[in-house]
Image (spheres, grey):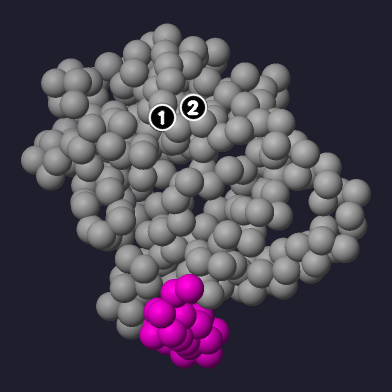
Amino acid sequence: MNYQKTMLKVLGQKFLVEFINLKEKIMADLSDLNKFKDETNQALRYKSQDGFVRVPIYRGFGEIETFHRAVMDESNGKCVILGGYIRFMCSPHPRPARAEDVDLYCPEQADFEKMVKFFSKMDMTIKHENDVAITYTNFESDHPFFPCPEVQLIKPMAQGVIVTQGSLEEIISNFDFTVIRIGLLSRTHALADADFTHDETNKLLRIKNIHCPVSSLYRVMKYRLKGYWPPSSLIVAILQDWNNRPEDYKKEIVDFFVKAENQKLEQEEIDRMERLLRLTD
């Protein structure tokens, strides 16, 4: 609970600061006509594409090879590694941002439970768990899966707009940024959003799904630290999504962060907020 509370408090503080900074950025961009024209022209030069394409792997498979092979054998090839680490593997950028963890998804609950038992059998230690994922501690050098990064086993669900189960394409279709809408197919290729190569090369954040504006803004902050650029249109879309949310939804989130600053939080409150924010990292 202490880990969850600390993470959510930090997120609340960062959100308020970054919210103000990003609002100032938008106003500055809009007042700078030349910069606004440049950004508009760039958007006109490249048209966002629909669908998914196969992309090559350039690096990083060796680090996860043993882990990946074991997961494929245990799940009969059904569980898949998606998201940030595969972005790193397939990035055409000469200096790609590394990923901190490996996100493993399962097509259904039975496969998830099988992975939990398998990881226990492999002496993988749970670092923390919430309603969204189980995060395991880093592997020691004598573990068979070393040097695979920290593993997050995502819990399968299909609740409203949130989908973390099904086929590889069904799951990544639900992801937000084009640069992480990607999943491992083989040791040589991955399936990626059609905009992946353009946006990853240019370190551009393009969003295709907003599940929660607060967590989306948090993720913008996270990827800014990795060197990605959020165009004004992305920030406007997030702010507009927040404005369009029901008042009860906004009040619950704001009240939570206010209370987190001054009072002890119950575990039930923390769990509910994590469900609202859909935090997996």
In 3D space, how far apart are the residues under numbered discs 2 and 1 (Cα atoms)? 6 Å
Q: Which is more toward the observer, 53 or 224? A: 53
Position of residue 152 in the picture relative to residue 74 (left or right): right
Residue at (80%, 67%) from the top-left corner?
27
Disc 2 + disc 1, Cβ < 8 Å: yes
Does residue 260 show up? no
Residues in magenta, as a range: 244-265
The disc at residue 112 is none
Residue at (27%, 17%) from the top-left corner?
69
Location of residue 197 with respect to 270 vertically, above or below: above
Position of residue 107 in the picture relative to residue 273 (left or right): left
Helix or strand or loop: what does disc 2 sit on?
loop
Q: Which is more toward the observer, 5 or 175? A: 175
Location of residue 121 with respect to 252 vertically, above or below: above
Which residue is label 2 attached to? Answer: 194
Which residue is label 1 attached to? Answer: 51
Point out residue 105 in the picture as x, y percentages from the top left corner: 28, 37
